[in-house]
Amino acid sequence: MKVEIYDQSYNVSAGDNEDYLRELAAYVDEQMRSVAQATRTVDSLKVAVLAALNIADELFAARAQGGNRRAAPQARREVRRAG
């Protein structure tokens, strides 16, 4: 199936989970657009890396709330600046 993330099309295999994959792609697209707007960065690679850091931060925070030992570092910060 084809999904679009940050104005780029990707062909991915979804099996029986097309709706779920569309939801994931939409979330990643939303995160990238949010980072691009907040940082005024136009370099799509930088936007992708910063969005990935934000998504990883969310994952680690969720793990920490669940008591997972592999949780986030103690100091969490949302990425707001481009490097």
Image: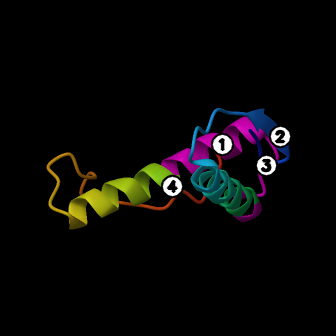
Q: Position of residue 27 (x, y in %)?
A: 62, 59
Q: Position of residue 64 (x, y in %)?
A: 23, 61
Q: Label 3 crowding class (10 Å Cα cut-off): few <14, some 14-19, many 20+?
A: some
Q: Quadrant of the C terminus?
A: top right
Tag 3–tag 2 contact (CB < 8 Å):
yes
Q: Is tag 1's residue or tag 3's residue first in the polypeptide sequence?
A: 3
| Cα gap from disc 1 to disc 3, whole angstroms | 9 Å
The local secondary structure at tag 3 comes to: loop
Residue 37 appears in the figure: yes
35 to the left or right of 75? right
| Cα gap from disc 4 to disc 1, whole angstroms | 10 Å
At 14% from the left edge and 49% from the top edge, which residue is drawn? 69
Mark number displayed over residue 54: 4
Mark number displayed over residue 6: 3
65 to the left or right of 7? left
The local secondary structure at tag 4 comes to: helix
Q: Main secondary structure of the magenta part?
A: helix
Name the amino acid, label 2. Gln
